[in-house]
Image: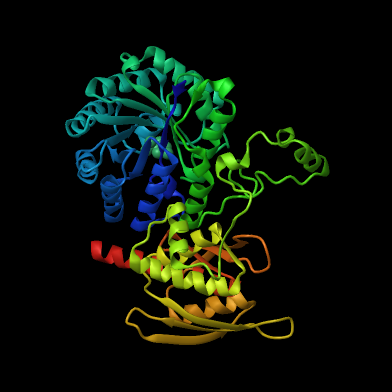
């Protein structure tokens, strides 16, 4: 059977989701999980964009085997050189060069004419080719570009040595049939098209990223660029799990498959959601909490008689097990470590100690500790960015006949304990005001959400927040069986990121 290359850009385009910034350690964990999932290409980052991005691409290039590792570069020499520098230890490095090709971008964004764009394309693809044999080229905003100019720019890229031509629907503007037609047109008209792989890169502004990508595959694209949970710039990118399961479930229709081990999909989705703090909507196809939940009596009756009456996919095929009971109070360190490794978390001995201590604390409060709880422990306890302020304790009084009051104690950067109290309109408001009295960093809370990680009254509550300051959004998350504690952790987590970003900006100045 013919095969589609799965190019995952969770760590690059996905990380461009507002507030989704990931630490280097988190990116390395995700890259290892993507390797287990069987993706063909991992776009690990945009090395010139920040020292953190460079470091993450370099670590992933060194450590991950079995997948091509890709780094993004604008069509400028410094970007291409920096991308190679980060990628050079990869088993199979790929440099991805892009430049705008639509008139609207050329006039208002990049401010260059067609001739200059063609020159830069040829020169920068050749420069990348001087470093690596595997070069991808993307004409940004391709779907709003002049077709004849697209043919020309892609011809130049092939002549300069590009091996993959990616066609981005940068602003999510295309319709499925139209996008499929564009791919077929380019394959037919670009000289040398038979020597390269055509790729689809679709954004979801009109909710059509998956449909557009599948239409592209039908018309000859053999690479799809996508992200876990469909995260990404604005409305996001094509969702990996949806496109892969569509190709697998309807193999008789597409006649084409991927190398993906679909049983790793759910775990990968959870890891990305935990680390980015971007919640998966319950009705999300394939990995949403309700994707395999049957509410109507007629459907339940059908499922009990024969699963396939109302289920087109087997939940086990996407990694959902019947029972999620894993560990409990009596489980030892060995079983804990083994289960974490099965879930894709390989911790250093010190990190394992911290995670195990948190597990024991949780197992005292909760009868069973599930896989979701374990993932939460790792993201909350181990992988949170360097703690500048650490929550020592929080105490609240609230109720319908009292004024909500919170006392918070934090350990500051120099190890000194800071304590203060505040009242508020509710317990969370009181906590946040008390924290503000201790960490005097102005910000605006723009999103607060709480969800339970698993079912049951003793479930862990996962709080995700977003705050805005300095024109940027910072995400924070916290987890605990007590949602006030989880809310405090989430706020301190977001403030730590904000302060770290200010410190990094001050160093760079
Ligand atoms: O959406 C886009 O155009 C991109 C390019 C950098 C490929 O992400
Ligand atoms: Zn994109």
Give residue 312's position: percent from left, percent from top.
66, 33
Query: In the visual, does 137 lie left or right of 269?
Result: left
For residue 142, side relative to residue 312 (left or right)? left
Q: Number of marks in the image?
A: 0
* Image position, residue 344 (x, y; %): 43, 52
Furthest-left residue in view?
130
- Of residues 207 and 152, the one nearer the viewer is 207
**Nearer to us in this view, 354 or 52:** 354
Q: Quadrant of residue 75?
A: top left
Q: Is residue 334 visible?
A: yes
Q: Judge whether residue 230 can be spotted in this image.
A: no
Ligand 2 is in which quadrant of the figure?
top left
Relative to 67, residue 181 above or below = above
Residue drawn at (50%, 29%), measured in percent from left and top? Answer: 213
- The image position of residue 185, as x and y in percent, is 44, 15
Which one is nearer the viewer's eye here, 411 or 149?
411
- Taking 209 as reference, is 296 above or below it? below
x%, y% of residue 136? 31, 30
């Amino acid at each position: 059977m013919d095969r589609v290359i799965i190019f995952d850009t969770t760590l690059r385009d996905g990380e461009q989701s507002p507030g989704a910034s990931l630490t280097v350690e988190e990116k390395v964990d995700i890259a290892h999980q993507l390797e287990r999932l069987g993706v063909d290409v991992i776009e690990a980052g945009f090395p010139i964009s920040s020292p953190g991005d460079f470091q993450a691409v370099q670590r992933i290039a060194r450590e991950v085997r079995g997948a091509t590792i890709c780094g993004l570069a604008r069509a400028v020499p410094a970007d291409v050189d920096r991308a190679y520098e980060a990628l050079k230890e990869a088993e199979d490095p790929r440099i991805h060069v892009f430049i705008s090709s639509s008139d609207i971008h050329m006039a208002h964004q990049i401010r260059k004419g067609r001739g200059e764009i063609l020159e830069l394309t040829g020169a920068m693809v050749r420069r990348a080719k001087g470093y690596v044999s595997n070069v991808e080229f993307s004409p940004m905003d391709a779907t709003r570009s002049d077709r004849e100019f697209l043919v020309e720019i892609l011809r130049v890229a092939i002549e300069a040595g590009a091996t993959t031509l990616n066609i981005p629907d940068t602003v999510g503007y295309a319709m499925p049939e139209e996008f499929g037609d564009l791919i077929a047109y380019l394959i037919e008209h670009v000289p040398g098209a038979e020597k390269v792989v055509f790729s689809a890169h679709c954004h979801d502004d009109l909710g059509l990223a998956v449909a557009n990508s599948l239409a592209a595959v039908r018309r000859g694209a053999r690479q799809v660029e996508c992200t876990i949970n469909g995260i990404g710039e604005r409305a996001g990118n094509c969702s990996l799990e949806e496109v892969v399961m569509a190709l697998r479930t309807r193999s008789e229709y597409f006649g084409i498959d991927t190398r993906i081990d679909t049983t790793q999909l759910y775990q990968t989705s959870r890891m990305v959601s935990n680390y980015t703090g971007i919640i998966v909507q319950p009705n999300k196809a394939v990995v949403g909490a309700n994707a395999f939940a049957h509410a109507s009596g007629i459907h339940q009756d059908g499922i009990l008689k024969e699963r396939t009456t109302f289920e087109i996919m087997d939940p086990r095929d996407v990694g959902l097990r019947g029972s999620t009971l894993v560990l409990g109070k009596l489980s030892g360190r060995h079983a804990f470590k083994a289960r974490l490794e099965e879930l894709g978390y390989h911790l250093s001995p010190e990190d394992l100690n911290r995670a195990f201590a948190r597990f024991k604390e949780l197992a005292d409060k909760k009868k069973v500790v599930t896989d979701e709880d374990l993932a939460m422990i790792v993201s909350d306890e181990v992988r949170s960015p360097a703690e500048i302020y650490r929550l020592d304790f929080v105490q609240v009084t609230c109720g319908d006949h009292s004024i909500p009051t919170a006392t918070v104690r934090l350990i500051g950067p120099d190890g000194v304990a800071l304590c203060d109290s505040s009242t508020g309109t509710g317990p969370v408001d009181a906590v946040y005001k008390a924290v503000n009295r201790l960490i005097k960093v102005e910000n605006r809370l723009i999103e607060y959400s709480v969800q339970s990680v698993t079912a049951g009254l003793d479930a862990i509550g996962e709080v995700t927040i977003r705050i805005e300051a300095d024109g940027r959004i910072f995400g924070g998350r916290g987890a605990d069986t007590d949602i006030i504690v989880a809310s405090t952790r989430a706020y301190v987590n977001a403030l730590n990121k904000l302060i770290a970003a200010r410190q990094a900006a001050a160093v760079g100045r």
